[in-house]
Amino acid sequence: MKLSDFDFDLPESLIATRPARPRTSARLLVAAGGEILDRHVSDLVDIFQPGDRLVLNNTRVIPARLTGQRVRDGIAAKVEITLLEAEAGAWRALAKPLRKVKLGEELIFSDDLKATVVDRGEADLRLSFNLTGEAFDAALARTGMMPLPPYIASKRAADAQDIFDYQTIFARHAGAVAAPTASLHFDAGLLAALAQKGVTFTEVTLHVGAGTFLPVKVEDVTTHKMHAEWGEVTAGAAAEINATRAAGGRVIPVGTTALRLIESAAVSGIVAPWRGPTDIFIYPGYKFRVTNALMTNFHLPKSTLLMLVSALMGQDAIRHIYDHALRHQYRFFSYGDASLLIP
């Protein structure tokens, strides 16, 4: 299985830099039984059925991008930091320019938020901040910006609108540095309408890491090593999913992050409580344990997420689906349109 099997040409004009407004007006490609329908997210009320259970990732994206200064010999220089994950009282982070940041140096982001470089590697560093807990969260909210994906950040800077746009309406547990983007299409009205129809919801938590944007660099994709992300499926969430399956209902993760987590928690074929890291890599040949369908956005060429949807639908079917999306000018990636994939 070669990396080139998951490549396609994407015009830059189809990369969305802002979401649809309102959220539910985004287009929705529905693929089921070899048929493709062009709908809108608001049509999910007519598409989902009573007894369906949507699995939602309730992670909250932190404003992980910081601009500050390092001061050396009385001379200040700009430094840009992107927080990646908390590690043993410190934060692993990317820095630009990394090569000019020295071990032990203090970085100043605002009057009340500072950090010391406590470790430095070839690709990233570790920062110890002067604040912890709620005080750190509050200072970060005042100072940081949303960590937009590289394909958006290269086109425009994050702004105040992204604080709302790049966060789901059910975000509860802070820790992600990338949004579970399929969930960005939901608003309170759509959730209420689905609930009234008899669709149920289960929340899980997977803190999406920046590794979700890392390219696959090996030609034999089966040798790729996935990044690990921390997640939790509570006992209550596991029981809800298992009950839906026992009753013959469909389990439909909203987003690849929710899918990867519940598949990680279902090693035995039944979803069990899970708390900890997962580095599950899903590519063609994978046998799905609990997932019946998937709502997801359109993914990067040669990405692990494209491999995941190919595993769910089949490689030929995904090529056909993506060809259709390209021909019909669907908007791609984090702020783009959505698909509902029903194998």
Image (cartoon, helix red, strand yellow):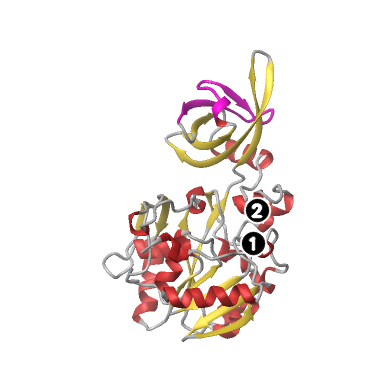
- Asked whether the beta carbons under mark 2 and mark 1 sit within 8 Å of each other, the answer is yes
* Residue at 56 percent of width and 56 percent of height: 179
Q: Quadrant of residue 166?
A: bottom right
- In x, y percent, where is residue 212? 49, 53
Mark earlier in primary sequence (2, 1): 2
Which of the numbered marks, if any, corresponds to residue 316? Answer: none
Near-viewer residue (261 or 95) = 95
Question: Does residue 263 appear to the left or right of 186 in the view shown?
Answer: left
Q: Quadrant of the N terminus?
A: bottom left
* Residue at 65 percent of width and 75 percent of height: 27
* Residue at 48 percent of width and 74 percent of height: 318
The magenta segment: 99-121
Foreground: disc 2 or disc 1? 2
Q: Quadrant of residue 134?
A: top right
Which of the numbered marks, if any, corresponds to residue 152? Answer: 2
Say what amino acid the circle numbered 2 marks.
Ile
- In x, y percent, where is residue 58? 52, 59
Say what amino acid the circle numbered 1 marks.
Tyr
Q: Quadrant of residue 273?
A: bottom left
Q: How many marks?
A: 2
Near-viewer residue (85 or 247) = 85
**Could you tell me how far apart the alpha carbons at marks 2 and 1 are, in whole angstroms?**
9 Å
- In x, y percent, where is residue 77? 67, 25
Q: Is residue 119 magenta?
A: yes
Near-viewer residue (196 or 39) = 39
Classify 65 as above or below 15. Answer: above
Neighbourhood count class around disc 2 (C-alpha, 10 Å): few under 14, some 14–19, many 20 upward: some
Secondary structure of residue under mark 1: loop
